[in-house]
Image (cartoon, coloured by chain):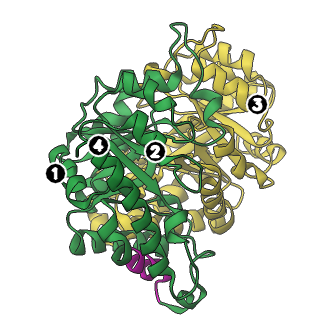
Chain colours: A green, B yellow
């Protein structure tokens, strides 16, 4: 999906919600555990319930890999299900990969060619040649970790260089010479909404993938106030707040309601921007 | 495997060689492609041929994930094969993971409990709480990326902070408060052997996993001169130079010869240190 298609879809859906499919068998409703593939069965129900209210899905690979071959199968089934039934939705494989060039090229092929996801999260530590192999695919995106919302983000991401620039700012700045806003997004954690003003000075146009609204504690209004662009420029993720809204057989209805509530807040923010 | 067991095994084997299982179906001998699982068949032959000359195996996950469910199965089969037939050998899952706490905990469970590998490579960008979940397992190790050997390593790893410390040095220093030399190793690229003197000033005792000897161009003698400790403290990896030494039906014999040649050089270096 290219930049313009993503912006159009956001306008049509009145939403910039990304639903994080962090599916954990210890948290899904007990009645699903007898299914042949409880992870996929759960995901399918969540997807059907939330698709009207979101524009993107973000399965976090860790949750699938922890179940080995079966988990990997459930991940593939989930991606294929979204592709087939909701072809307009954007799919982000939250993999946080990043390796030397030839290895990154293997990942790029796996995720962009074989699985046909739209975007992949990448860790920037290994630099340019670990990211470049992902940039040769038209309509495919790299979502680079910049400022994450966890406590440990302060350990290195906030380290100041001799030029006064923090590491996450350097990542934002340096990586813009690798690809423009049509192929690159950034992960920017939402716990401090005002930080978005600093981020927007460095990346005025790029989409930002914002985790941490909801369970991790960020405020949607603040994120929009400081982070929204004329093309929206935001994908706001919620995982636990939606997919574990309820763990009874009514889990899907509860997920729909939680996603709907966020979508309504988002519609207000889009309206404010004239989008 | 704990620190003392690893040091003893290195002394016994007269080797600190790690064989990188970066198995690529485009490079394995053609006659294997008709096998039911060409990746596992290739790995098994390489492992049987090289086990007398090495102390560790390092499958790089990217090469397996690129083949989806089948690749993941081949990875699991490979780890189980080593565990069963060569229980003294150290297994490093080269995964370069690193995520927020609860997600890292999922990875830790998958790799340390279910698969029973000895170590996992981790990217440091997300800081302490992305690494901590891996440190709760006795005899299991985190191999933290510090200085990688690729061109892009200069983009961020060499950035100097206001205190004159480069980012990779900060990673080495900060992370020592997370775990000691019995649970933590560091990836330090080998293209500039003299860099190891600086590294050893910061981490005098930790094991270093050194990629880039061989195909990536580092010199074994230089690495040992500047990087070896009284307990060896080095695992030197070679991937392509061993596993693709030949692509005829004699590939395993060629791999054995390449590993044996490196082992003999390593025995000389161990001897020099009185190990």
Q: Eyeballing the image, is A49 above or below B118? A: below
Whether labels 4 and 1 share one chain: yes
- Image location (x, y in percent) of residue B107: 60, 58
Determine whether, in the image, residue A253 is placed left or right of residue A85: right
* Circle 2 residue: A221
> Badges 4 and 3: C-beta atoms under 8 Å apart?
no
What is the CA distance from the residue labelled 1 to the residue labelled 3?
47 Å
* Circle 3 residue: B176
Boundaries of the magenta span = A36-46
> Badges 1 and 2: C-beta atoms under 8 Å apart?
no
Q: Secondary structure at mark 1?
A: helix
Q: Quadrant of residue B113?
A: bottom right
What is the CA distance from the residue labelled 1 to the residue labelled 2?
25 Å
* Circle 4 residue: A232
Q: Secondary structure at mark 2?
A: helix
- Image location (x, y in percent) of residue B123: 56, 39
Q: From where the camera sits, is residue A270 visible? A: yes
* Circle 1 residue: A5
Neighbourhood count class around disc 3 (C-alpha, 10 Å): few under 14, some 14–19, many 20 upward: some
What is the CA distance from the residue labelled 4 to the residue labelled 2?
13 Å
Q: Eyeballing the image, is B196 above or below A237? A: above
């Amino acid at each position: 999906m290219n930049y313009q298609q993503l912006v159009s879809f956001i306008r049509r859906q009145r939403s910039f919600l990304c639903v994080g499919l962090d599916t954990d068998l210890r948290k899904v409703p007990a009645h699903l555990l007898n299914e042949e593939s409880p992870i996929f069965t759960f995901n399918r129900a969540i997807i059907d319930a939330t698709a009207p209210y979101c524009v993107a899905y973000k399965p976090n690979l860790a949750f699938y890999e922890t179940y080995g071959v079966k988990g990997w199968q459930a991940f593939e089934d989930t991606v294929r299900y979204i592709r087939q039934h909701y072809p307009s939705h954007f799919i982000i494989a939250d993999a946080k990969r990043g390796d030397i060039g030839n290895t990154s090229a293997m990942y790029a092929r796996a995720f962009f060619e074989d699985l046909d996801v739209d975007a992949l999260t990448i860790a920037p530590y290994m630099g340019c040649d670990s990211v470049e192999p992902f940039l040769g695919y038209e309509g495919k995106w790299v979502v680079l970790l910049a400022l994450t919302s966890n406590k440990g983000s302060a350990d290195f991401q906030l380290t100041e260089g001799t030029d006064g620039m923090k590491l996450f700012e350097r990542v934002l700045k340096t990586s813009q010479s690798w690809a423009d806003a049509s192929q690159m997004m950034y992960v920017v954690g939402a716990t401090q909404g005002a930080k978005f003003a600093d981020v927007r000075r460095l990346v005025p146009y790029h989409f930002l993938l914002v985790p941490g609204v909801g369970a991790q504690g960020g405020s949607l209004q603040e994120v929009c106030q400081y982070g929204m662009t004329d093309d929206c420029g935001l994908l706001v993720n919620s995982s636990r707040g939606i997919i574990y809204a309820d763990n009874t057989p009514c889990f899907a209805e509860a997920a729909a309601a939680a996603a709907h509530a966020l979508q309504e807040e988002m519609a207000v923010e889009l309206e404010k921007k004239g989008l």
